[in-house]
Image: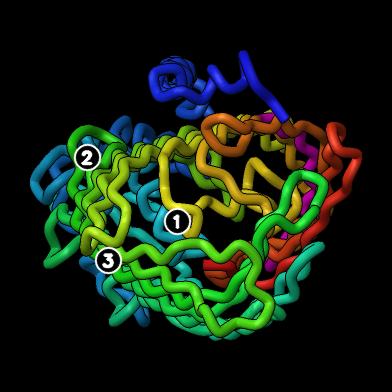
Amino acid sequence: MITGKYNYLLNFRNLLGVLLFCCGLFFWSISCAENGDNSNSNSFEADKFKFIENFGDLPIREFRIRGLSRTSSSVVKKQINVSLGENISRFDPDLFTNNSEIRRLFSDIQISYSAENDMAVIEIMLHEKWTLIPFPLFIRNSNKVMVGLYVMESNFLGLGKTLYGGANYSNHGWSTLGGYLDSAFMSSDFKINLFGKYSMEEYEDADESGKTEREYKAQSRIFRAGIGHPVIKNMDIYLFGAYSSQVPDESYSKNINLPDAQKEWIASTRFDFKNLKYKEYLSYGITLRLDIARHLAVSDNYHNYNSLEFKSGYSCILYKNKLELLFNGYYGDPPDILSKRVGGRSGYYTLPADITVSKRNLSGTVSVERPLVEISWGAVTAKLFWEQGVYGAESNLSRFYGPGGGFFFYLKRIAIPALGFNYARNLGTENSEFSVSAGANF
């Protein structure tokens, strides 16, 4: 357990100070992300300048988009930074290819230029990924075995919208969820984010050695809706409204130290900054997400509180290796039933999965990921990392630190997340944690 200086690290002012320091570091490092490897777009840029040398800086007559069978051409045209009639020199192929790859709808993008009637024609050839994916879910760690089935369509109605849903079952209970993401609502710059989840699961809270301190069963419901809009380049602001209900089952025979129920309305603001480059199955660059929320009790029987959560990362490609630095943090005073289950998640792999809870936590991770096998339809990578941080409650914080590693499998032509294996060692407690996953965990 930690008192004194580690407890001081997680007071509100110092957590904000750490956040601002990370922001400064990441923004200072933007140049590295922007100078990453993007050989295809560099070739397209060279072809554009060669065209200008031969034919002049002609006005653009047409964008000819080829290879689309399921995707609306409007999805592609929205990523183009110029309009018809503007000079071809203003067309940015690097920006276009990166914006298109962000959507992960296309496995290959080719751009060529031609002259017709003293005007320029830009031809874009695309190879679509298969985006309607029914896939199973399997997760195994030291405390849970979970199986599930989800369906995700990342090109709903050919408009680049994402619709997903499914259910899972584990040795702790079951849950079902669904959601909808729209990055261009009604062809505007507004973004829509909808999410809902219902679950009936058994929970266990334990200390850092794995000793059980609380056990209960609870019904959980959450419904969330948000609208976002870009404010500056690469940054969106979202406004969310949500309803959350967490009700323990008093008839559950294994109840130990039963927590109080909580029903609340949530009003939150999210600042979401992304400056990423995409290279086949890997992304690299800068991300920063900050959520500030006010939790309003439905009645006097429940608890009001504030919360702040951030996730940030910086990564770059160096000699085929992906180097990454991640920070995660949470500050709040939630009721016990809504404590964060940090163990087994990014930044907290060295902590016992699903049973480690926290109301104040801060972690940093440095990692390197390298391709081992690359073929036309996929790749296998190996990853090594070191993570370190603190977690717990305001007056009772614990430190964790240790190394870990894993293997991941990516599919290039199907919009599906990596399959993987993780192993981590907590040097403070000398405990080891592992996880195996297949499919996507929402």
Q: CA distance from mark 1 to mark 2?
A: 17 Å
- Which structural element holds mark 3? strand
In the rendered view, would you say 272 is above or below 216?
above
Q: Say what amino acid the circle numbered 3 marks.
A: Tyr
Give the magenta range: 377-389
- Judge the density around disc 1: few (<14), some (14-19), many (≥20) Cα neighbours within 10 Å: some
Q: Are marks 1 and 3 in contact (CB under 8 Å)?
A: no
Residue 325 on the magenta span: no
Q: Quick one: which residue is furthest to the right in this view?
A: 430
In the drawing, does residue 347 fall left or right of residue 393? right
State which quarter of the image contains the N terminus: top right
In this image, 358 relative to 17: left or right? Answer: right
> From the viewer's perspective, is the residue at label 3 or at label 2 nearer?
3
Main SS of residues in magenta = strand
Upstream in sequence: badge 1 or badge 3: 1
Residue 16, above or below 355 = above
Q: Inspect this view and state whether residue 111 appears.
A: yes
Residue pointed to by mark 3: 243
Can see residue 66? no
Is 353 left or right of 132, judged from the image as shown?
A: right
Q: Which residue is mark 1?
A: 110
Name the foreground residue: 326 vs 176: 176
Q: Going 54% across and 17% down the picture, which residue do you hit?
A: 8
